[in-house]
Image (spheres, rainbow, N blue to C red):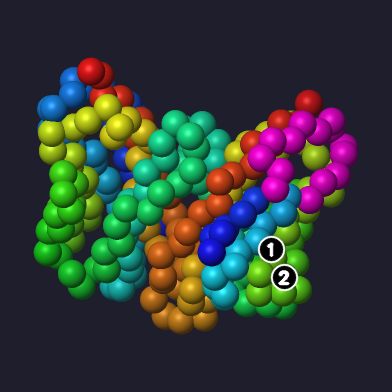
Amino acid sequence: AQKVTQAQTEISVVEKEDVTLDCVYETRDTTYYLFWYKQPPSGELVFLIRRNSFDEQNEISGRYSWNFQKSTSSFNFTITASQVVDSAVYFCALSQGAQKLVFGQGTRLTINP
Amino acid sequence: NAGVTQTPKFQVLKTGQSMTLQCAQDMNHEYMSWYRQDPGMGLRLIHYSVGAGITDQGEVPNGYNVSRSTTEDFPLRLLSAAPSQTSVYFCASSYSGRGSFPDTQYFGPGTRLTVL
């Protein structure tokens, strides 16, 4: 069965620090997709990134970067020079079949000024 | 495009009451789904649909019904509300419902439901 584990329930850092959110997944599928979503205090879910299992290149988007390692079944998310606006709950998710998503428990990130 | 819309934003029910949570999308997406979000448990799939007239159960379907008569709408019905159904409900949609590879799912703003 598919499973996503985000072991960090809550993280609190001071602004401008770098922070990494961990995501470990389990699947027997050879083809799968991984996602990260952000849920700010307003409550909506904002899509951040989608990565397929054949593409292990790291991705960088501004202050955000993602490290995908199939050998350790991990898809970690790093925020560089964090800002208060980065405060949110972050979810990692794994595709189950064509469209169904299995979510991790979420990591609540607080950036203190 | 309005994207994915959900109504109502908030709802309080008494045990045993019924209601329908509405979800609509204007992006001509084939795939639509309902999730519930509970503290410490992430989001869990309730029901999903890969196209009009086709629905299937997710991880936690008990107590909920769905139907998909049009591409745009995917309502979630609670026939007899229970306190265990207190949660935040999210509707999502994506372009490809029957393809092999998942498209990105876009979520509505959510409905916060309290059952007393």
Which secondary structure, mark 1?
Answer: loop
Q: Is residue B110 above or below residue A83?
A: below
State the image coordinates of residue B53 (x, y, percent, origin top left).
Answer: 72, 77
Residue that lies at the very extreme toward the front in this rendered image: B1
Write down the chain letter for disc 2: B
Specify whether residue A51 is in view: yes
State the image coordinates of residue B101 (x, y, percent, origin top left).
Answer: 39, 76
| Label 2 crowd bin: few (<14), some (14–19), many (20+), radius 10 Å | some
Marks 2 and 1 close (CB-CB < 8 Å): yes
Work out whether mark 2 precedes mark 1 in sequence or the reverse, and give the earlier one. 2
Instruction: Give the amino acid at mark 2.
Output: Arg
Name the quarter where the C terminus of chain B is drawn.
top right
Same chain for mark 2 and mark 1? The answer is: yes
Instruction: Give the amino acid at mark 1.
Output: Phe
Name the quarter where the N terminus of chain B is drawn.
bottom right
The residue that appears at 72% across and 74% down in the rendered structure is B70
Instruction: Tell me the CA gap for discs 2 and 1.
Output: 5 Å
User: On the picture, is A99 further left or further right than B81?
Assistant: left
Specify whether residue A69 is in view: no
Which secondary structure, mark 2?
Answer: loop
| Label 1 crowd bin: few (<14), some (14–19), many (20+), radius 10 Å | many
Residue that lies at the very extreme toward the top in this rendered image: A113
The residue that appears at 42% across and 40% down in the rendered structure is A39
User: On the picture, is A11 further left or further right than B74?
Assistant: left
Which image quarter: residue B110? top right
On residue B74, the disc is 1
Q: Is residue A17 above or below residue B72?
A: above
Boundaries of the magenta span: B7-20
Which image quarter: residue B93? bottom right
State the image coordinates of residue B103 (x, y, percent, origin top left).
Answer: 41, 70
Which residue is disc 2 drawn over?
A: B68
Residue nearest the observer in this picture, B36 or A18: A18
